[in-house]
Image (cartoon, grey):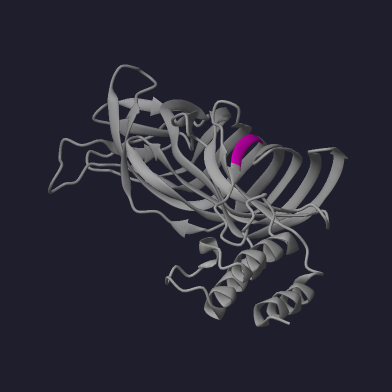
């Protein structure tokens, strides 16, 4: 028997039992994909406020004193207790763009997803209204003269803009495929991911640190020729409360006068960050499509890496077909067989 024929038969027997796989590179369509969610931040602090008056450097500054009545000395500047919160709550309705790869084993009914990256605000920043709440004890000021009764004060302070929000896969997602009809499958995939981003408030950009989350996609896949289209949905319900109890750096705050109105009191805030609560509840709907990935192991180019590729390669190799020069060194020999089998074993 010819040596090459013997090699073909031996290698065919070696791989005859291995399963098929198809890998597609998919792009998320931002016109059909998006995040709808309720997002909020609730920041609570407590501490003191005091006028910015200083006998040496700011004699024209504001002075403060707790209480509504009584003597107010000409140089008195005493702190008053205060609680301050910042609340941001709003609905998001954004476009989503991104990409990922999906590998399907139709014989075993398995699916894996890798490299999932989604820009959740691809259509532009998501904006949340911001409100400052101030709950001081009753106090008085001089320069300007005013009285502040100890009732909560809500002050709109603009908007928080979520300028970036990314969902990125951190570990391969795996799941099952169930055939609905020819070329159409339902699927469910579970993996690990993290969410991170940036927001801007009062002109100051701040990073949203990476937060671990679950990549849990369910939906349908439609295969047609060399293309695949996925429609899927992921639900989010992430709420978190932290109690850092950390002092904040002193910062200035200009407060409109109450009684009488029309002027500005210049105050210094000395606060402790007591609690930070975040809310993120919603759903991410995705439509993604793409084609078979470039796959050297798919020698017969039918979209699957299986034993038929081995047979096709070995037939070409036995016939000295130029396509069998797999390592492109100009010689058809056993090194091409090894190079092909390495690529075939890796799949797509």
Q: Is residue 259 left or right of residue 337?
A: left
Q: From where the camera sits, is residue 119 visible?
A: no
Residue 111, above or below 152: below
Q: Residue visible at 65% across and 68% down?
A: 314
Is residue 153 a member of the stretch shown in magenta?
no
**What residue range appears in magenta?**
285-290
Q: In the rendered image, which quarter is residue 307 located in?
A: bottom right
**Quadrant in which the C terminus appears:** bottom right
Question: Residue 289 placed where, x, y %?
Answer: 61, 37
Q: Nearer the viewer, residue 228 or 124?
A: 228
Question: Residue 309 placed where, x, y %?
Answer: 68, 61
Q: Residue visible at 50% across and 32% down?
A: 150
Q: Residue visible at 52% across and 67% down?
A: 326
Question: Most prominent secondary structure in the magenta stretch?
Answer: strand
Q: In the rendered image, which quarter is residue 78 located in?
A: top left
Question: Residue 101 placed where, x, y %?
Answer: 60, 50
Q: Is residue 113 left or right of residue 195?
A: right
Q: From where the camera sits, is residue 162 visible?
A: yes
Q: Residue visible at 29% across and 30% down?
A: 265
Is residue 288 a member of the stretch shown in magenta?
yes
Instruction: Pick out the residue farthest to the front.
Output: 1
Q: Nearer the viewer, residue 72 or 51?
A: 51
Instruction: Pick out the residue farthest to the left.
Output: 56
Question: Residue 125 placed where, x, y %?
Answer: 44, 31
**Quadrant in which the N terminus appears:** bottom right
Q: Nearer the viewer, residue 259 or 320?
A: 320
């Amino acid at each position: 028997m010819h040596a090459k024929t013997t090699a073909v038969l031996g290698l065919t027997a070696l791989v005859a039992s291995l399963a098929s796989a198809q890998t597609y590179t998919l792009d998320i369509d931002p016109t059909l994909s998006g995040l709808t969610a309720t997002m909020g931040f609730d920041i609570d602090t407590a501490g003191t406020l005091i006028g910015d008056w200083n006998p040496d450097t700011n004699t024209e500054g504001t002075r403060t004193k707790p209480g509504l009545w009584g003597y107010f000395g000409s140089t008195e500047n005493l702190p008053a207790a205060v609680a301050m919160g910042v609340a941001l709550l709003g609905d998001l309705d954004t476009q989503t763009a991104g990409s990922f790869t999906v590998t399907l084993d139709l014989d075993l009914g398995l699916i894996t997803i890798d490299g999932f990256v989604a820009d959740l605000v691809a259509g532009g920043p998501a904006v949340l209204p911001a409100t400052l709440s101030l709950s001081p004890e009753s106090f008085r000021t001089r320069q300007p003269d005013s009285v502040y009764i100890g009732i909560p004060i809500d002050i709109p302070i603009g908007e928080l803009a979520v300028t970036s929000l990314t969902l990125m896969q951190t570990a391969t997602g795996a799941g099952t495929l169930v055939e609905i009809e020819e070329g159409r499958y339902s699927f469910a995939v579970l993996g690990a991911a993290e969410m991170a981003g940036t927001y801007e408030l009062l002109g100051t950009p701040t990073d949203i640190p990476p937060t671990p989350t679950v990549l849990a996609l369910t939906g349908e896949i439609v295969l047609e020729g060399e293309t695949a289209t996925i429609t899927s949905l992921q639900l989010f319900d992430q709420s978190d409360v932290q109690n850092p109890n950390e002092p904040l750096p002193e910062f200035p705050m200009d407060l409109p006068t109450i009684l009488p109105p029309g002027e500005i009191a210049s105050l210094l805030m000395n606060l402790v960050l007591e609690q930070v609560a975040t809310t993120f509840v919603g759903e991410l709907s995705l439509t993604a499509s793409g084609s078979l990935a470039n796959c050297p192991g798919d020698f017969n180019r039918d979209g699957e890496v299986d034993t038929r590729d081995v047979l096709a390669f070995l037939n070409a190799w036995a016939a000295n077909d130029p396509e069998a020069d797999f390592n492109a060194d100009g010689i058809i020999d056993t090194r091409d067989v090894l190079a092909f089998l390495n690529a075939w074993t890796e799949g797509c």
